[in-house]
Amino acid sequence: MPIIRFIQPDGSETVALANVGESVMQAAVNHQVHGILGDCGGSCSCATCHGYVDEAWTGHMPEAESYEIDMLTCAMNVRPNSRLTCQINVTPELDGLLIHLPDTTS
Amino acid sequence: MTTAVPEDTALIVGAGHAAGECATSIRDQGWTGRIVLIGEEPHLPYQRPPLSKAFLSGELAIEQLYLKPQATYDKARIEFMPNTRAERIDRAARTVALSDGREIGYTKLVIATGGHARRLALPGMDVIEKQPNFHYLRTLDHVARIRTQFHAGARLVIIGGGYIGLEVAAIAVKRGLRVTVIEALPRVLARVTAPELSAFYERVHREAGVDVRTGMAVSGFELDASGDAVAAVVCADGSRIPADLVIVGVGLQPATGIAEAAGLAVDNGIVVDEHTRTSDPDIFAIGDCTNHPNGLLGRRLRLESVPNAMEQARTAAATLCGKERVYNSVPWFWSDQYDLKLKMVGLSQGYDELVLRRAPESRSFSAFYLKDGVMLAADTVSRPQEFMLAKRFVAEKIPVCAAELADDSVPLKSLLPAV
């Protein structure tokens, strides 16, 4: 089971054991990672699963498609490495993936 | 037999979207006592929207529907009791009687009973509902059964032209079934959208091969010669539609009986305040079954939507842990049919002006419902950015100019006031 590490703005970390084939969002929700809600169940409808893919990992996954990009433009604190984690599928290659959570307090 | 309560217990009656989110949220908020989830179905809390979409089409397995796996509840020390109905609340004793004869004590109680599929109010329905090819569509088990009868060539009659009926039609016609949708009102989606949207969706479905019949009420059913299956749907005008499979989606009956019997205020749902508290300070209600105040709309309403279930769940969890929280959000919904991603913001009843941004024929457009120069609601079709922006226009009651809204060359974002 690939491991995904979710890092909060304050530096605290949750190590999640993910299942190949599920979304990064679902792995986060299963481990109750703060900041990732996934309210629409992963249908790219709510942008509550926003995360920053660590620079070292952005090249290890398919790029965002236009629908996700459109949804992202209206999320808060968007950066070049922003993704809606419901659209990232967990593969064995993503073992060790690092996701940073946006600061939602500002 | 009464179960002794050695520690505080947060008891949740129901195991759907709202209940599942509430259970983990209560633990997250710092509750150290027992958390118990009581569900009448055999399944862990699961997502309902895919039942009429990817689960019906066979793209998703049952396990992929669960909100969270068993392991997540185990880790959070949440006790889940499936196949168990809560029968009665004794508010004085603070206990809930269960269908297996046990009683559970509670410190805080959350009612998340959702509702049941509204039944057709026709004579003889008891017999019809027992037929193996007649289905309501609300639960995972309803759809698991429907899936086994989804054969190419089968004549499917869907009663109800709301979101559920139309989503099922879209999946079915793609799977090669011969689909008829019967809607009693003059147009599909009549209660929730403008005539222009109804016309668009009727056209889309007809182009896909669905026989959409509006302004048609169902008056009864015919059984086949053996009496073991429905053979046709009979309409009020006397017409007869042969059917191999009948699916009914005509709304939800909120499950408020247990609250009403316990003397809690009930009025089109269990009445709660903005903290999801019922008329009893230790009892909360969340999700499809609640009548709650919405500050933005300035009135009470009962909402059947996933965002409502999730947000009320979090509000109840925080509040019952002593961190009073207010639930006041803009309602929003989504419906996927064919390649069209319909996302809706707000409630459009009472609008005085409709503004279309691009023609519906483009299959990528938005419809804005204005009232007194402010955006009341929006239906966006495959326009995710405009959906997200509309949430702000509606929530902040930003004054809008119809001509600018209608002009696709003016970015919607530019119409927001400068921050």
Image (cartoon, coloured by chain):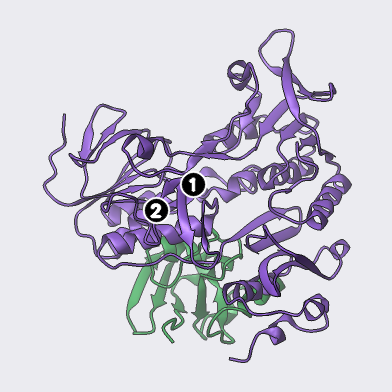
Task: Give the residue at the far top of this rendering.
Answer: B226
Marker disc for residue B272: 2
Shade representing chain B:
purple
Q: Which amino acid is tagged 1?
A: Glu
Q: Does B50 appear above or below B402?
A: above
Which is nearer the N-term, disc 1 or disc 2? 1
**Quarter where residue B415 is shown:** bottom right
Callout 1 crowding tier (Cα within 10 Å): few <14, some 14–19, many ≥20: few
Q: Are marks 1 and 2 on the same chain?
A: yes
Q: Is residue A1 visible?
A: no
SS of the residue under disc 2 = loop
Shade representing chain A:
green
Q: Residue at x 34, y 84 (%)?
A: A11
Task: Give the residue at the far bottom of this rendering.
Answer: B418
Classify residue B37 as left or right of residue B232. Answer: left
Give the number of the mark in front: 1 or 2. 2
Marker disc for residue B316: none
Q: Does A79 appear above or below B292?
A: below
Q: Does B1 appear above or below A88?
A: above
Which quadrant is the C terminus of chain B positioned in?
bottom right
Mark 1 and mark 2 residues within 8 Å of each other at the beta carbon:
no
Q: What x and y, as percent, mark residue B105?
A: 20, 41
Q: Which residue is at the front of the view, B241 or B198? A: B198
Q: Residue at x 77, y 37 (%)?
A: B181
Label 1 marks which chain's residue? B
Residue at the disc numbered 1:
B63
